[in-house]
Amino acid sequence: MAPAGTAPRPSYEIPTAGVGWQEWAACRGLDVSVFFSPDTERGQARARREMRAQQICEGCPVRAACRDHALATGEPYGTWGGMTETERRRHARRRGERRSLPPRRPVSDDAEREWASFR
């Protein structure tokens, strides 16, 4: 059964790439504060929030597509496909990517609008 306020998701083939994978995301309709940190968040609070976000991502049917999107676009903020901001920065450094992700910053109106497009 679908959560209140969301359409039921059919059980047939789930897209894993391209436009539309967001429709199948486990995070669809959830509060963005689970995936994006407020500007005052530090230490244990951040670790708890990131762990909660990663738990949601763990069972997501489009986790790989979400993660690949974040890596391909250099998404600098939030948890995407189970990867935190820090994990994506490390991944980029290991791969020797020239494009470096900007330092972490508070969620902006732009990030809020971007996230809202997935809901």
Image: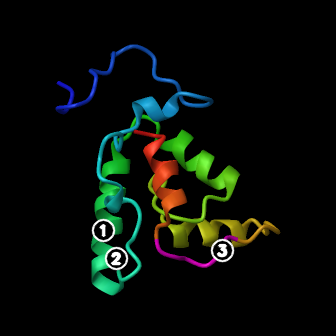
Marker disc for residue 46: 2
Give the spatial CA distance, label 2 vs label 1. Answer: 5 Å
Residue position marked by numbered label 1 in the rendering: 49
Q: Amino acid at mark 3?
A: Pro
Residue range (magenta): 101-106
Residue found at the very far bottom of the displayed protein: 43
Quadrant containing the N terminus is top left
Magenta stretch secondary structure, dominant? loop
Q: Residues within 10 Å of mark 3 (few under 14, many from 20)?
A: few
Front-lying residue, 77 or 54: 77
Q: Residue at x 54, y 30 (%)?
A: 16
Give the spatial CA distance, label 3 vs label 2. Answer: 18 Å
Assign a secondary structure to mark 1. helix
Q: Amino acid at mark 1?
A: Arg
Residue found at the very far front of the displayed protein: 109
Q: Residues within 10 Å of mark 1 (few under 14, many from 20)?
A: some
Q: Position of residue 116 (x, y in %)?
A: 43, 45
Q: Position of residue 78 (x, y in %)?
A: 47, 62
Residue position marked by numbered label 3 in the rendering: 102
